[in-house]
Image: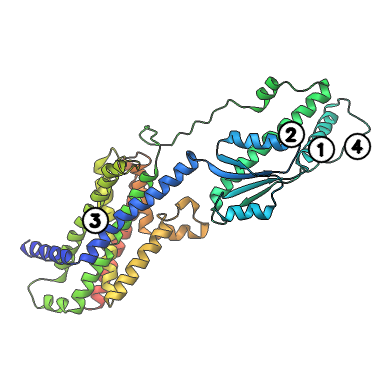
Amino acid sequence: MYKLRATILKDIRLLLRDKVGVLFMFIMPVILAIVITAIQNSTFEMVNDNKVPLLISNKDTGVSGAALVKAIEKVGMFEIRQVNKDLPDKQLIERMHNKDALVALVIPVEFSAKMKAKANSIANKALNNFGAPVDTTKTIVSVAKAEPITMYYHPVLQESFRQSINGALRSSLQIVESKQVLQTLYFSLNETNLPDSLEKDIINTDVAINQVPVSRDGAHTIPNATQHNIPAWTIFAMFFVVISLGSSIVKEKLNGSFIRLKTMPTNYFVALLSKQITYLFVTLLQAAVIFAIGAFLFPKMGLPALNLPHDMAGLFIVSLICGWCAVSFAMLVGVFAQTHEQCNGIGAVSVILMAAIGGLLVPSFAMPASFKLAMNISPLHWALEAYYGLFLEGGKLKDVLINILPLFAITVVLQLLAILGLKRKNLV
């Protein structure tokens, strides 16, 4: 016990001397958590609260073009800026390059005429199917195509956001088309215009959509950017102990500490246990610091607060196993790396790769099928799923055991590989 205590004190002193390692383990993940959470939160606010600037060039002189503009305005997603209908498309695009707007819409000249022709075609087909009298002088043909509108978008607009805008515009178009068809059908049957009150009753829907996040505790707390980012970057910080711990093992291999230990009444397993205990404490301290920042500092910075899980014992056990896995990985890299450069390069790159395929950088549900196997091998994936089970789903320890067990198995494999590497090199 005395040997272990003395070795732990030695490792703590060495750790405190490694200013760069401490910087990587604490300052960098905290900055990443703050910056990325702030960016994502502002993005969510832009989508939900702020309006997207939209340039509209309505070249149509009929009623359908104006109706489409009103329908788009009612969506509530856009800040509409109408431009002169005679403005050439080239100048419209130039305004987009100047960042006046990221999206522009051009309604063509014959939009109303083509929309009316399509509505008449649909109405005649419907009346013919109903057996109602139709104008026999008109041939029932396939439904006419409406004049397409053109949507210009800036290349910086991401595809997911562009699809959201496209969906909103399609909804507006659908409303205009449906109104036109209803008005044509009603006039054909009654020879009077469709009353506004009846049109609203038919077109508008009062069916609300209740968005309820599924949770195990029944609290239905709406997750925010902080709930997603803090667990992810906590795991990222834990695994970056590879920079400090790996370099420490490489240094002791190069300066002959292994050989000197063989001449003493002890063995290197005590040193390995000491390093694991020391850096396991560091990983738990990292988790505590980042969680505290999310819970107490974020609200003062105008960011959503981190809601800690109700099962604090489960949170500690998950953090403990995640930290032990990170320490085991760092030890494995340090055993097999020959130089400090190899350790730092391989360690940093491998952590980023495991984070990418593990769901920290890209959500796991968005991963292609070819990455599913690699994702299940990444310890960061199982660690993130365990944290999400506690933070987002409101689960308890028993609910995340299915994620903890694979993480524990990966940790054991990493430990065995590190010991086998030491034996193969005749270092223990």
Q: Residue at x 35, y 41 (%)?
A: 304
How far is mark 1 from mark 4, CA to CA? 13 Å
Residue reaching furthest left? 2
- Inspect this view and state whether residue 154 appears: no
- Inspect this view and state whether residue 285 appears: yes
Q: Mark 2 = which residue?
A: 63
Q: Mark 4 = which residue?
A: 139
* Sequence-wise first label, 2 or 4: 2
Mark 3 or 4: the one toward you: 4
Circle 2 crowding by C-alpha within 10 Å: few under 14, some 14–19, many from 20: few
Q: Residue at x 70, y 22 (%)?
A: 196
Mark 1 or 2: the one toward you: 2
Number of labelled discs?
Answer: 4
- For badge 1, the amino acid type reads Ala
Q: From the top left corner, tell me how far across and down residue 380 is, in percent.
A: 36, 56
Q: From the top left corner, tell me how far across and down residue 144 is, in percent.
A: 81, 41
* Sequence-wise first label, 3 or 4: 4
